[in-house]
Amino acid sequence: MSAATMMRDLVDVGRDRTRGGYSRPVFSAAELELREWFRAEAHRIGLDVETDRNGVIWAWWDVPGHRREDAVATGSHLDSVPGGGAFDGPLGVVSALAALEQLRAHGHQPKRPVVVVVFPEEEGSRFGVPCLGSGIMSGTVAAERALALRDADGTTFADALKSNGLDPSAVGPDPDALSRISSFVELHVEQGRELVDLDQPVSIGRSIIGHGRWRLRFEGQGNHAGTTRMADRRDPMVAAAGAVLAAQQLATALNGARATVGKIVPVPGGSNVIASAVDLWLDARHEDEAALGPLVDEIGSRASKFATDSGCDMALTCESYSPTARFDDGLVSRMSEVLADAPLQDTGAGHDAGVLAPYTATAMLFVRNPSGVSHSPEEHAEDADIDAGAAALARVVGELSST
C-alpha cells in the first residue's frame, strides 16, 4: 500500500471541529486510535510489535539468527499540536511502514534488523515537554520530572501511563533500547518552504537549530474590572502583553532568531476580572547557541521591568532546552550518495532525531510542503511527494540494512 493511500486512512482521526485541523494529544482517544492503527498495519506487513516500559512502540523486521541489535531504525510520532496539520508526525510513521512494505515486496533481505519506532508526546501538547518519550528513553528528561508533569485537567503523566496499562515505576532511561539502534532516520513533512523554492520533493536533514521553552509567570492582584480604578491596579496581563511585544521586537532585531508566545493562561480567566496571575510560554530558537541565551535573558529583563512598572512580580523558568543538534556526518554523506538529487537542509523545528543524535547516528528526510505552513490546518503534502518521500526512505533503509 502506498504512503499516500495510508495517509487517507487517517484523515478522520482526531479532527478538531473547533480549531480546524487535528488535535491528537498523547493518550487521547485519537492518538490511541492511531497507535492501534499502527499496530494493525505493522502486523499486516509482517512486523513484530512491542511496546516498551516508556510507552515507545517498536515494530521489528527481524533477521533470522540475528538478535535485535545493531538495527536500522526509522519512524516518528503520532501526536499533534492543538489544531495541527495532518502530516506532522504521522507522515513519518506512515512512510516508514510504506518503505518497509516496498522493500519486502521487492524481495529485500536485510542483513541486520530494521525497526519502525513510534515515540509518544513528541509535541508536548498535553504535558508541556516536547520529545518526552525520546527524552525519557535517552535520559535527557528525568523520570521523576516526567511522571509529575500535569496536563490542563490535572492528570499527571504517571496517571496517564497507568490508565493505559503502563507501570510508572518502570519509566526511565533505557540504554539497552538505545543500544539496539545503529542508525535512526526520521522522515517528516517540511515545516517551511525551502523545498518549494528549490523545486525538490525531498531533502536530507543536516541539523536542528538550538531551541527551548520558557515559562514567564506574572503575579499581581486579582480585582473587579468595573470598580477598580486604573491607577489602583496591579494587572499582570499588562506586564505579560509587554513581554509578548518585547519578544517579537528583540527576535526581529537579531538575525536568525525566532521568538514566539503561543500560549497565555490568565488566572482566574474571567472576562470581567483583573487577573491575579498570568502564565505565558516563550518558544525561542537560534542556530547560534551563544546568541540564544542572551536573547532569552534580555526578554526576561524587559518582562521583569514591565512587571515592576505594573506593580507585579515576574519569574522566568526554563521548561525545556535542546542545543543545536548536528546529524551524523557519515550517515548524511551515505544518504547523499543514495539520494544524489536531494539537497541538504537545516531546520528550526525540534524532532526525536535531534534528541537521539548524541547517542546514535541520526539524520532526517523532509518532504515538500507546498503551503510552507506547519502546526496549522494549512500544512500539506501532495500525494506524489508523499510517495516520493517513502520511496527515498526505502532506498536509504535498504542501503543501510544491506551491510
Image (cartoon, rainbow, N blue to C red):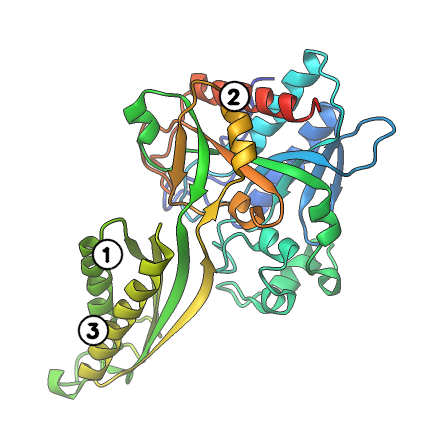
Comparing 228 with 380, the one in front is 380
What secondary structure is marked by label 1?
helix
Q: Quadrant of the N terminus?
A: top right
Say if mark 1 contacts mark 2, CB within 8 Å. Answer: no
Q: Residue 303: image x %, image y %?
A: 25, 73
Q: Is residue 204 left or right of residue 56?
A: left
- Quadrant for the C terminus in the image: top right
* 3 vs 1, front mark: 1
Measured as percent of width and height from the top left, residue 225 is found at 20, 78
Estimate the x, y position of residue 113 in percent, counting from the top left: 75, 31
The residue positioned 44% from the left and 16% from the top of the image is: 384
> Mark 2 — residue?
337
According to the picture, the residue beneath numbered tag 1 turns out to be 251
Q: Residue at x 71, y 54 (%)?
A: 174
Q: CA distance from mark 1 to mark 2?
A: 37 Å
Q: Is residue 260 visible?
A: yes
Q: Secondary structure at mark 3?
A: helix
Of the residues shown, which amino acid type is indicated by label 1?
Ala
Is residue 43 shown above or below 26?
A: above
Q: Marks 1 and 2: which is nearer the front?
A: 2
Q: Is residue 333 left or right of residue 70?
A: left
Q: Residues within 10 Å of mark 2 (few under 14, many from 20)?
A: few
Helix, strand or loop for disc 2? helix
Total label count? 3
Can I make out residue 87 in this image? no
The amino acid marked with disc number 2 is Glu
